[in-house]
Amino acid sequence: MDLTWMYVWFAFLFGFAIIYWIFIMPYLKRRAANQSEQIMAEVEGEEDKVKLRLLTDQNYLKPITDVVGSYNINGLVNCMERRSVKDVLKDGAINAAGSLAGKAFGVKMEKSNNTEKYYFAVEPFYMHYMEFNYEGKLTEHIKYDRKKVKQLILSKAKFSDNYTGGQSGTRRLEFNYEGEPQRFFLYQGFMQFPTGEIKIGFSVDKEMTYVNKLYSEPLWEILN
């Protein structure tokens, strides 16, 4: 391929990228939003029944309610793995060497298959961080008494927060708990059930829509 064709091909790709970001992506977002609204309209007035079905079904949220020990979950999102300041600095140095390039979710040095699933949930008196393995089995659970949570700050994650070399969390949650600083990176919504595959994009799934509308969106109001 001579340079002329290379320039033509590059110009085509560049033009398509511009068209995609300006026209196609907004259209897909609007279509997904409309479909989500239609899905919720179908169950209007029956939200409590939908919640109970999700909370008691092993394929959806039952693994999480079994850990929380309650159906009184007010907010729920996927998140990145919980980090300490020491871990962030350590992994940041490794990332600089390129040995963790491409990791999107698993962030410990020994984790490279991105099969772990992380969640942050809020109920009236407690907040929970949970980690499940690829089989949907609980591997870690941290419970925070909300009365002991101090200096809670929710902010938009910065590009510099993306210490894994992959996708950054969209919201950064920080607070002090019993004298120890805590930091979480929460994704914008709910993308994966403990026993299911991750779903990213503009395809609309009914159960995923229910969780996002009934649990993920309310979480931001609770934490703000």
Image (cartoon, grey):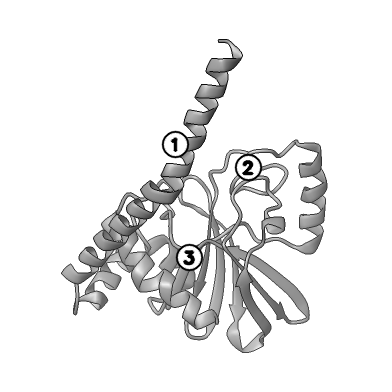
Tell me if 76 is positioned left or right of 57 in this view.
right
Residue to which mark 3 is pinned: 77
- Using the image, tell me which numbered label, if any, was put on residue 16: 1
* Quarter occupied by the C terminus: bottom right
74 over 19 or under it: above or below: below
| Callout 2–callout 3 Cβ contact below 8 Å | no
Q: Amino acid at mark 1?
A: Phe
Q: Amino acid at mark 2?
A: Lys
Mark 2–mark 3 Cα distance, whole angstroms, equals 20 Å
Give the total number of marks visible in the rendering.
3
135 over 119 or under it: above or below: above
Crowd band around label 2 with a 10 angstrom C-alpha radius: few (<14), some (14–19), many (20+): some
Mark 3–mark 1 Cα distance, whole angstroms, equals 33 Å
**Residue at position x 62%, y 46% from top?**
166
59 over 127 or under it: above or below: above
Q: Residue furthest left?
A: 42
Tell me if 34 is positioned left or right of 164 in this view.
left
Q: Nearer the viewer, mark 3 or mark 1?
A: 1
SS for dot 2: loop
Mark 2 or mark 3: whose residue is earlier in sequence: 3
- Using the image, tell me which numbered label, if any, was put on residue 103: 2
Crowd band around label 3 with a 10 angstrom C-alpha radius: few (<14), some (14–19), many (20+): many
